[in-house]
Image (cartoon, rainbow, N blue to C red):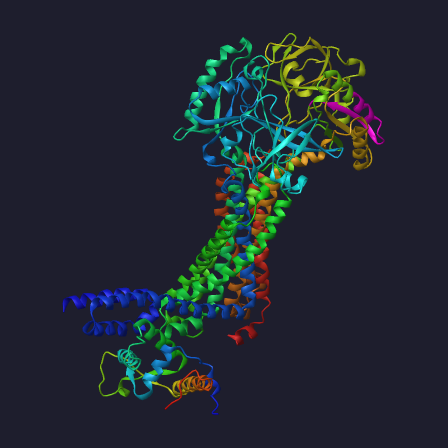
């Protein structure tokens, strides 16, 4: 079994909001509103991040070094001048991976007890 | 679109709910996001969402800031243990002292009394202006009361009660218990309900039906072990048996000690209530004086003044029913609560005021300490400001630090105060109603919390303002600390000057109280402290005068023969026992006395037993009983016989012009006795010869306990169901009589001492700090050849300047404030020159020491070393 990095494990378990924000940033850099839309689309409208929750989480994720804010010149081409873009840091990537792994291990255990249907 | 712009700006306004830092960082984004959503989403649910979001997340962001600040503050406190320990001690003492005094105020003045709507309760008095020297607070004559009840319209109910003591007899031995005979409306008037059974009703309050008793919760617990079947039980009081019909709740003990002016209850509360059951004759007769205390409940909308006008008019109409020379009765209506707490109210507010000054000084000290510490943190502040922290953010951080400090101090204070309240209750001075019930209840804890928060804001404000005024440039320039030095030193000096001023005021107040106390201790009471006194109350088996006399004579004879008893005597009234008998006197060749004089019946050895000196003439002898002879005191001789020889003069005693005793010859003059309290001058007094009386005095040699035991044995041998009551030496009585003053003086002195210590500590800290700041300057001066004395003078002058300013303000304040306590002073004026001079002098001397010590250290600095460090 792959061991989880000690510095990443300190962040676990993640709240659903933080997890989804990290996942949203896994493929590409995004600004706040697109993160919101991304999360909402991916969860089929189950999880709607409110602006207060979104930016509160972003503030603390920045402080913890899970994400960083892009400088102007690093922004993607669809750059909207007024917006701030965020990117996953290597630590953030490790953390979201560790969380995904933790959850998949949980699923495996549940499956072993017949609580989750086997994949066909 | 116009409306969407309005919506966006409205949303921006709502964002003000977030902490400034958060708003600055993300406010723009959030507003932008809101505008984006406005394009795509229906407005109503969007607004609902937005408002709910702000309501949920803004407090959370504040919470995060608070936690960050608290963590930072805690780190700061741990990093400066000396500062933290001193500041915590100072603020804990300040808050604890205030909380403790407040718990007394709460118990005595604020907590509601165990009566329904106590504000409507009044005492009804019936003074007679013809009786000079008699207090106005006299209960009405019983027939007048019943006429008031019928004729008056101002009260929903009125009731009579009479305090008494009774021997509660069980198993062949007896205990004294405080009892009250009450009319049927007593409990309904007070709106007091029993916790068990019922109270006395009009069926019980009739002659022949009165063998029922309501008892207190205290008696129920202590004597009957909280027996659930207490109702219906029979108890024996003196020789009579009563059926217990009810138990009152724990808080109810009315009338308690101090509840009725000029009356002394047995024990500190009433434990047994019995029906008064006045007979028809008692309710009607205006020739046999019987009076009792009266209470009433005002009807809604009726003031006590209005009720008094009505009662006085009724009373005036009743006067013709009295024999001509006994008229002149009137009526007074006084609020009951105010009457009970009135005498201690001002004292308590005074103590609370004094302790508030102590708290202010403590807050000043903590503020001063924080300012001093701030200059050590100038660099930190500079860096934070340079990194973009707003002023408001720094103010918030400093206030949080201050609040954390004072709240921990407040928690310590509650622990301290818990101990202090217990100690005070144990040191109960007596005579203060409901003093025993002082506790740290919810209200007291709430006040402690408010004080802690208030102290945090007040003591954090000055440092925060100073810190926020300093520019980044200044802070980061060369030595990093100079930016704050000027402002903080001036700020601290002002604080210390105020502290000195406040402590001068407190010390002056305490000084005057102490001077009064010393003067009082020097007062000659007119009797010896080493006299044992007690009384022996009898029950109705001794109603016949001759049975009574025989019993007391026998008992006195036994007392005389107790080993160690030097003189034993008896009197109708002992000094400092709240009992009094007054009479008019007519003096041969002079006429009637203008005031009532003290009138006593005493046995021959009473004077010697009490230790009062004989100034002229002789004592009574056994043969004087029933002879027309009297003894007067020195005051009587001076007022009525002036310089002439009182021996051989004639006088007679009586109330009004009725019932004059026969003309009697003055055979002796004795020293003055302070009867009511040591603080009241002696009144003219007449002693008449008696062969018995119910209060005993024994002048004894050796230890007291064997004498008390022998006296008990002597009483038991005569009648085992009787008890010695109020056993106290005269020194005990002096101590009790001074108790309130001792308490007040002790507390004020303690507060003053704390205040002075705190102010001195502040002064010392200020000078040490100034010395530290000027180390290099001092080093340069010394290197350039300045004399040590010169440097010393320079620094001390700096400190004494602050002290002098404080003294000036303080003395002016003291002169204004001490006038407020003139009512409590004894033998000294509020502007007593000794106190007015001694207090500033004392402060000046100790302040000089507090300044000179750090200054002296400064002059011992090696200039080279000091300059190198710079």
Number of callouts: 0
Looking at the picture, does residue B200 appear above or below residue A34?
above
* Quarter of image, res B120: top left
Classify residue B279 as left or right of residue B649.
Answer: left
Q: Is residue B345 in sight in this rendering?
A: yes
- Image location (x, y in percent) of residue B834: 59, 40
Residue at the limit of the structure toward the bottom, as seen here: A1
* Quarter of image, res B632: top right
Report if residue B663 lies within the magenta region.
Answer: no
Q: Quadrant of the C terminus of chain A?
A: bottom left
Looking at the picture, does residue B743 appear above or below residue B293?
below
Which residue is at a point 44% across and 64% down the rendered structure image? B400
Span colored in magenta: B553-572
Report if residue B568 lies within the magenta region.
Answer: yes
Q: Is residue B576 in sight in this rendering?
A: no
- Image location (x, y in percent) of residue B82: 56, 66
- Foreground: B516 or B553? B553
Looking at the picture, does residue B757 appear above or below residue A37?
above
- Foreground: B690 or B853? B690
């Amino acid at each position: 079994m792959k061991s989880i990095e000690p510095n990443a494990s300190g962040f676990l378990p993640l709240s659903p909001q933080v997890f989804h924000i990290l996942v949203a940033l896994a493929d590409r850099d995004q600004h706040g509103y697109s993160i919101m839309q991304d999360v909402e689309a991916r969860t089929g409208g189950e999880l709607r991040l409110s602006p207060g929750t979104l930016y509160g989480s972003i503030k603390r994720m920045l402080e913890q070094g899970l994400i960083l804010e892009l400088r102007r010149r690093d922004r993607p081409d669809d750059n909207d001048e007024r917006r701030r873009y965020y990117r996953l840091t290597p630590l953030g990537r490790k953390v979201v991976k560790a969380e995904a792994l933790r959850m998949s291990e949980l699923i495996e255990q549940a499956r072993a007890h017949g609580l989750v249907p086997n994949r066909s | 679109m116009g409306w969407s712009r309005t919506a966006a700006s409205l949303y921006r306004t709502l964002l003000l709910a977030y902490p400034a830092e958060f708003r600055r960082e993300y406010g723009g984004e959030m507003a932008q996001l809101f505008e984006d959503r406005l394009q795509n989403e229906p407005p109503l649910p969007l607004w609902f969402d937005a408002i709910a979001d702000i309501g949920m997340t803004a407090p959370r962001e504040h919470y995060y800031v608070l936690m960050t600040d608290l963590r930072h503050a805690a780190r700061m406190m741990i990093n400066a243990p000396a500062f933290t320990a001193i500041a915590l001690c100072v603020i804990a003492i300040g808050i604890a002292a205030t909380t403790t005094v407040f718990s007394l105020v709460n118990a005595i003045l604020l907590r509601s009394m165990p009566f329904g709507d106590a504000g409507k309760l009044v005492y009804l008095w019936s003074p007679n202006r013809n009786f000079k020297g008699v207090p106005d607070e006299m209960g009405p004559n019983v027939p007048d009361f019943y006429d008031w009840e019928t004729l008056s319209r101002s009260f929903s109910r009125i009731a009579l009660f009479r305090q008494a003591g009774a021997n509660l007899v069980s198993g062949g031995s007896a205990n004294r218990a405080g009892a009250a005979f009450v009319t049927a409306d007593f409990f309904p008037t007070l709106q007091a309900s029993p916790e068990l059974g019922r109270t006395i009703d009009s069926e019980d309050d009739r002659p022949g039906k009165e063998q029922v008793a309501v008892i207190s919760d205290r008696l129920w617990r202590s004597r009957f072990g909280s027996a659930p079947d207490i109702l219906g039980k029979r108890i024996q009081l003196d020789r009579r048996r009563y059926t217990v019909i009810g138990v009152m709740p724990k808080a109810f003990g009315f009338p308690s000690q101090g509840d009725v002016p000029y009356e002394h209850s047995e024990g500190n509360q009433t434990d047994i209530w019995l029906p008064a059951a006045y007979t028809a004759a008692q309710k009607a007769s205006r020739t046999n004086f019987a009076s009792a205390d009266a209470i009433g409940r005002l009807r809604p909308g009726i003031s006590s003044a209005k009720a008094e006008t009505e009662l006085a008019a009724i009373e005036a109409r009743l006067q013709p029913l009295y024999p001509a020379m006994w008229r002149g009765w009137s009526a007074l209506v006084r609020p009951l609560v105010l009457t009970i707490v009135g005498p201690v109210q001002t004292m308590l507010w005074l103590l609370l005021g004094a302790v508030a000054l102590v708290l202010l000084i403590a807050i000043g000290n903590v503020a001063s300490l924080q300012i001093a510490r701030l200059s050590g943190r100038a660099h930190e502040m500079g860096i934070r400001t340079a990194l973009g922290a707003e002023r408001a953010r720094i103010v918030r951080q400093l206030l949080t630090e201050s609040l954390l400090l004072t709240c921990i101090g407040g928690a310590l204070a509650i622990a301290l105060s818990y101990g202090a309240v217990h100690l005070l209750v144990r040191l109960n001075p007596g005579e203060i109603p409901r003093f025993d019930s002082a506790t740290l209840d919810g209200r007291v804890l709430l006040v402690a919390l408010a004080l802690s928060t208030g102290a945090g804001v007040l003591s954090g404000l000055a440092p925060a303002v100073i810190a926020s005024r300093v520019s980044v440039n200044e802070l980061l320039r060369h030595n990093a600390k100079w930016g704050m030095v000027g402002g903080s030193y001036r700020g601290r000096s002002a604080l210390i000057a105020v502290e000195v001023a406040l402590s001068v005021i407190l010390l002056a107040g305490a000084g005057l109280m102490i001077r009064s106390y010393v003067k009082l201790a020097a007062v000659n009471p007119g009797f010896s402290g080493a006299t044992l006194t007690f009384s022996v109350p009898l029950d109705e088996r001794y109603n016949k005068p001759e049975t009574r006399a025989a019993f007391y004579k026998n008992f006195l004879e036994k007392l005389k023969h107790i080993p160690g008893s030097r003189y034993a005597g008896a009197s109708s009234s002992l000094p400092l026992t709240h009992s009094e008998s007054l009479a008019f006197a007519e003096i041969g060749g002079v006429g009637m006395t203008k005031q009532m004089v003290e009138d006593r019946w005493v046995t021959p050895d009473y004077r010697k037993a009490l230790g009062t000196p004989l100034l002229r003439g002789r004592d009574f002898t056994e043969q004087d009983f029933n002879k027309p002879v009297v003894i007067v005191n020195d005051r009587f001789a001076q007022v009525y016989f002036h310089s002439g020889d009182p021996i051989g003069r004639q006088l007679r005693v009586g109330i009004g012009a009725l019932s004059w005793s026969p003309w009697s010859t003055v055979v002796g003059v004795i020293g003055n006795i302070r009867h009511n309290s040591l603080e009241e001058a002696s009144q003219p007094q007449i002693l008449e010869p008696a062969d018995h009386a119910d209060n005993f005095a024994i002048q004894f040699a050796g230890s007291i306990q064997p004498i008390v035991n022998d006296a008990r044995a002597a009483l038991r041998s005569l009648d085992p169901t009787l008890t010695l009551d109020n056993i106290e030496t005269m020194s005990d009585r002096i101590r009790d009589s001074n108790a309130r003053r001792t308490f007040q003086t002790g507390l004020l002195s303690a507060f003053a001492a704390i205040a002075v210590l705190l102010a001195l500590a502040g002064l010392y800290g200020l000078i040490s700090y100034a010395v530290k700041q000027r180390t290099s300057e001092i080093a340069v001066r010394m290197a350039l050849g300045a004399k040590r004395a010169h440097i010393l003078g320079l620094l001390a002058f700096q400190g004494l300047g602050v002290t002098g300013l404080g003294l000036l303000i303080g003395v002016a304040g003291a002169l204004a404030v001490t006038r407020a306590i003139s009512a409590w002073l004894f033998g000294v004026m509020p502007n007593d020159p000794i106190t007015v001079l001694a207090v500033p002098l004392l402060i000046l001397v100790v302040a000089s020491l507090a300044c000179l010590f750090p200054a002296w250290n400064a002059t011992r600095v090696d200039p080279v070393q000091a300059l190198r460090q710079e």
